[in-house]
Amino acid sequence: MCGTFTTEPITAMAALKIRADLSSEELRRLTRGESDGRVCRRLLAIAMALDGISREEAARQAGMDRQTLRDWVVRYNAEGVEGSAGSAPHRSTAAAGRCP
């Protein structure tokens, strides 16, 4: 019902799982041979998240916001390391809160 409030506690969403076919150490190793700094930051942020660092802190250390890290995790889960290269993932206009 619109306009009503609940007294039940609001719980945080569960963190998006990250594929585990590569360990955080393996992702860090891959960054050593990578010439694109953007790809390095993306992989390092994912590696930090795999190590248990909060998504917010991992994103901050990698120079991005938490939502951007989430977008990269979605792409990494779908495409693997290859998905870390290229331009930023695009959100649909509906997901971004804009009218088409």
Image (cartoon, grey):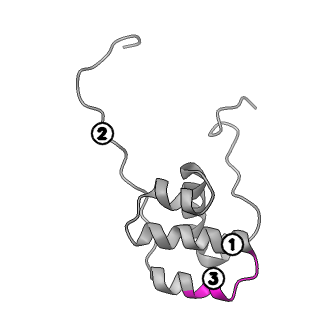
Amino acid type for the residue under numbered disc 1: Val
Tell me the kind of residue under disc 3: Thr
Residue at the front extreme? 61
| C-alpha gap between disc 3 and disc 1 | 8 Å
Which residue is the site of mark 1?
39
Separation (CA) of disc 3 from disc 2 = 35 Å
Q: Compared to 99, does 43 lie above or below?
A: below
Q: Quadrant of residue 35?
A: bottom right
User: Which labelled disc corresponds to residue 31?
Assistant: 3
Q: Is residue 33 above or below residue 20?
A: below
Structural crowding at the residue carrying mark 3, measured as other residues with C-alpha within 10 Å and reported as few (<14), some (14–19) or many (≥20): some
Specify which label sits upstream in the sequence, 1 or 2: 2
Q: Nearer the viewer, mark 1 or mark 2?
A: 1
Identify the residue shown where x is 67% and y is 77%: 82
Per the image, label 1 sits on a secondary structure element best described as helix
For residue 100, above or below residue 55:
above
Q: Residue furthest left?
A: 8
- Between 95 and 39, which is closer to the camera in this rendering? 39
Which of labels 3 and 2 is toward the front? 3
> Are the two marked residues, 3 and 1, in contact with CB atoms closer than 8 angstroms?
yes
Position of residue 9 in the picture relative to residue 54 (left or right)? left
